[in-house]
Amino acid sequence: MTSIPRLGHRCSNQYARLILQSLIEVAGENGMRAVCRLAGLAALIDDLPPENEAREFDHSDLAAIFQTLNEIFGSHGSRSLAFKAGQMTVVSMLETYGANFEVGGQPQPEIPMDEKVDKGLEGVRFMLHQVSDQQVDLMHDETSGAWWVKVRDCPICQGRESAEPVCAFTEGMLDQAVFQFSGGSKFQVREMDCIAAGGDACRFLVQIPKPENPPFTV
């Protein structure tokens, strides 16, 4: 496996733990044991990061895990697993952090849909800023009705190289956030630019699905 450089970006032990628990759930313990072993992180499955907020888990280790996931399960298989893990991680984050960060996933039917989606994406942005060195910016294009999510210092693709975007995990996180906050509506979430594919940041498009662009399903 190609070595992932360490750039000094980290996330909290608790956040890394939630990600790993989600990956174990979707890929199986034996599958993730193989992933971590090939990624040079064999001890992780039996010794998950502690449940604390110290930022001690290096982004490069997460990138190595997702790169190895791709090598073992292939592009399509790893994308499906990463997407599902991203969805599960948002659910776990809202359960773990929602009250502390004053965000939650309860739908509010009396407010407009745009505001619901704004709240869901802002909740993810706020939580990621609290638990990692990622920098997340949001923009709502009222003309097209779409949202853009820009992620810098992304832990999923740090140091990786690919001909196409690889951050299906983040797509899953955004998908689950807008699903929960919108009251169960499905949106199209697609990574349009990726650092691994040569972009200066990872950029995700969130919009109401059209017939020619259905939401990602697994």
Image (spheres, grey):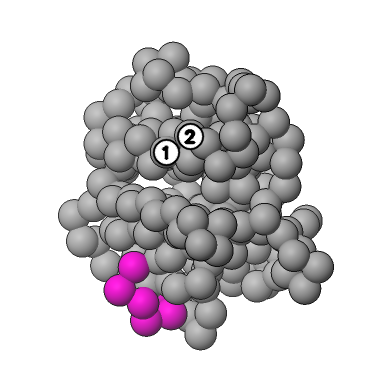
* Location of residue 148 in the rendering, given as x and y in whole percent from the top left corner: 45, 59
Identified by mark 2, the residue type is Lys
Q: Which residues are magenta?
A: 196-201
Task: State the CA–CA distance, disc 2 to disc 1.
Answer: 5 Å
Residues at circles 2 and 1 in contact by the CB criterion of under 8 Å = yes
Position of 77 with respect to 113 (left or right) is right
Position of 20 with respect to 158 (left or right) is right
Position of 164 with respect to 126 (left or right) is right
Identity of the residue drawn at 66% across and 39% down: 179
- The correct choice, above or below, for 125 with respect to 218 in the image is above
**Magenta stretch encompasses residue 200:** yes
For the stretch drawn in magenta, the main secondary structure is loop
* Location of residue 156 in the rendering, given as x and y in whole percent from the top left corner: 43, 58
Snapshot quadrant of residue 47 = top left
Identity of the residue drawn at 40% across and 65% down: 202
Label disc, if present, on residue 122 of the rendered structure: 1
Identity of the residue drawn at 73% across and 69% down: 213
Identified by mark 1, the residue type is Glu
Q: Which SS class for mark 2?
A: helix
Instruction: Please give the residue where the numbered disc 2 appears in the rendered image.
Output: 119
